Amino acid sequence: MKSIAFTLPLAFLAACSAGPNEAEGAEKFSGIEYDETVSLSGTEPFWNVKISGNRAVFSSPENLEGTSFAVERFAGLNGVSFSGRMDGASFDAMVTPGDCSDGMSDRTYPYTVTITLGAEQLNGCGHTDRQPFSGPDQP
């Protein structure tokens, strides 16, 4: 029994380090340039985030002026994320390519969005100033 207890953790370690890292040499996501303004939005509840550079503004029907806060950008292999703190709560937005519908308009957005704000998860769509949504300007 002792040898199984000792061997099992070694097997897990070996699995973690086995073979070359496939992500090495892979290019980071470059679909959204640093200087693009990123607009994210969702429904139920309604919310909107606009990100320019290292600043984000989160707004909602309860806070029309919005709350501005600093974010850091991270380009992964299939998207970009923005992380920061808003009013003491952690904020993480993951933006990945893919057609997205807000379910309320006839618009199609080029990005899907998942935001974690504290313990709350928000789902929505996104676009940039260079990669707009398609469909009506005023839904």
Image (cartoon, helix red, strand yellow):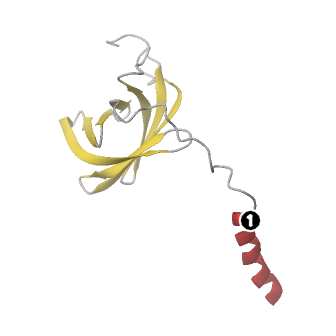
Judge whether 42 appears above or below 108 on screen: below
Q: Secondary structure at mark 1?
A: helix
Quadrant containing the C terminus is top left
19 left or right of 48 in image: right
Look at the image and tell me whether residue 53 can be seen. Answer: yes
x and y percent of residue 128 in the render? 38, 26
Q: For the view shown, which residue lies furthest in the left direction?
A: 65
Circle 1 is placed at which residue position? 15
Circle 1 packing at 10 Å, graded few (<14), some (14-19), many (20+), is few
Residue plotted at (37% across, 36% down):
34
14 left or right of 138 in image: right
In which quarter of the view is residue 137 placed?
top left
x and y percent of residue 80 in the render? 46, 40
Q: Which amino acid does the dot numbered 1 rest on?
A: Ala
Judge whether 68 appears above or below 18 on screen: above
Residue plotted at (44% across, 14% down):
134
Quadrant containing the N terminus is bottom right
Residue plotted at (47% across, 18% down):
108
Label count reads 1
Q: For the view shown, which residue lies furthest in the bottom direction?
A: 2
21 left or right of 136 in image: right
Residue plotted at (35% across, 31% down):
38
x and y percent of residue 35 in the render? 33, 32
Look at the image and tell me whether residue 1 can be seen. Answer: no
x and y percent of residue 136 in the render? 38, 10
Q: For the view shown, which residue lies furthest in the front direction?
A: 25
Question: As rendered, which of 114 and 69 lies closer to the eye?
Answer: 69
Judge whether 11 appears above or below 63 on screen: below
In which quarter of the view is residue 51 placed?
top left
